[in-house]
Image (spheres, rainbow, N blue to C red):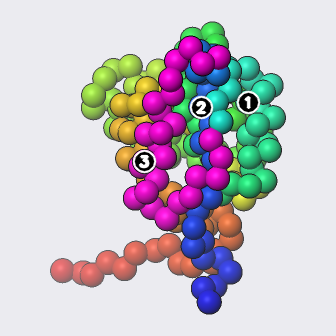
Amino acid sequence: MPPPFLIVMIKVSILTLSDKGSKGEREDASGPAIEKMLKKIDAEVVSYDILPDEKALIKKKLISLCNKADLILTTGGTGVSPRDVTPEATREIIKYEIPGLAEAMRLKGLKKTPFAMISRAVAGVRGKTLIVNLPGSPAAVKENLSVILSCLPHAIEKIKGSQKECARSFKKS
C-alpha cells in the first residue's frame, strides 16, 4: 500500500467560463482539449461544467469543486475584456497564489504571440486543491497546459502534505 501522501489518481474538475458556451451558442472545444491532455498524467476528470462569466457563480462553483477535486482547471475569462472575471473570482477564494505556473504559461505564450502578456491567468491553492486558470482558446489551452502539466502531480502531492524531498542530486564534473 502506498504512503498516505502519495496520490495515485489525481481528481480533476474542468470549469469552462463562457457566456455563449453556457447558453449553448458555442461548442466548448477547450474543456475537451484539457481532458485529452490529462491522459498524460494519472488524472481522472470528476466533473466538467460550463458557466457564464459571472463572478459570484464562478466563486460559488470553485468553492464547491474544492470538496471533490485535487485540481481545478478553468478555461476562459482570463483576458482583459469587461466580462473576463475568472482571475478575480479565483483570487477571492484561494488562500495563496503559485505565480510561477502562470508566469511559465505566459512565457511560453510570448514565443507565439505578444498577446500572451495580457493574460491575467492565476494559479493558487484553496484547502488541498490547486486551481489553475487557462485561456479560453483550444490552441492556447494546449500550449499553456503543456508547459505546466508535468509539474502538476508533484505540486498536488506537496499541497496534500507530502514530506518527500524535492531537491535534485547533482553530480560534480
Which amino acid is tagged 3? Lys
Which amino acid is tagged 1? Ile
List the single residue furthest toward the front.
24
In screen coordinates, is 58 left or right of 135? right
Which mark is drawn over residue 36? 3
Q: Is residue 46 magenta?
A: yes
Give the image quarter of residue 74. Answer: top right
In screen coordinates, is 6 left or right of 67? left
Q: Which callout, 3 or 1, points at the residue further toward the start of the chain?
A: 3
Q: What residue is shown with label 2?
A: 16
Badge 2 local density, few (<14 within 10 Å), some, or many (20+)? many
Q: What residue is shown with label 1?
A: 58
Q: Are marks 2 and 3 in contact (CB under 8 Å)?
A: no
Q: Which callout, 2 or 3, points at the residue further toward the start of the chain?
A: 2
In the depicted structure, whether residue 23 falls above or below residue 14 = above
Residue occupying the point 58% across, 62% down: 10
Q: Are marks 3 and 1 in contact (CB under 8 Å)?
A: no
Magenta highlight range:
23-48
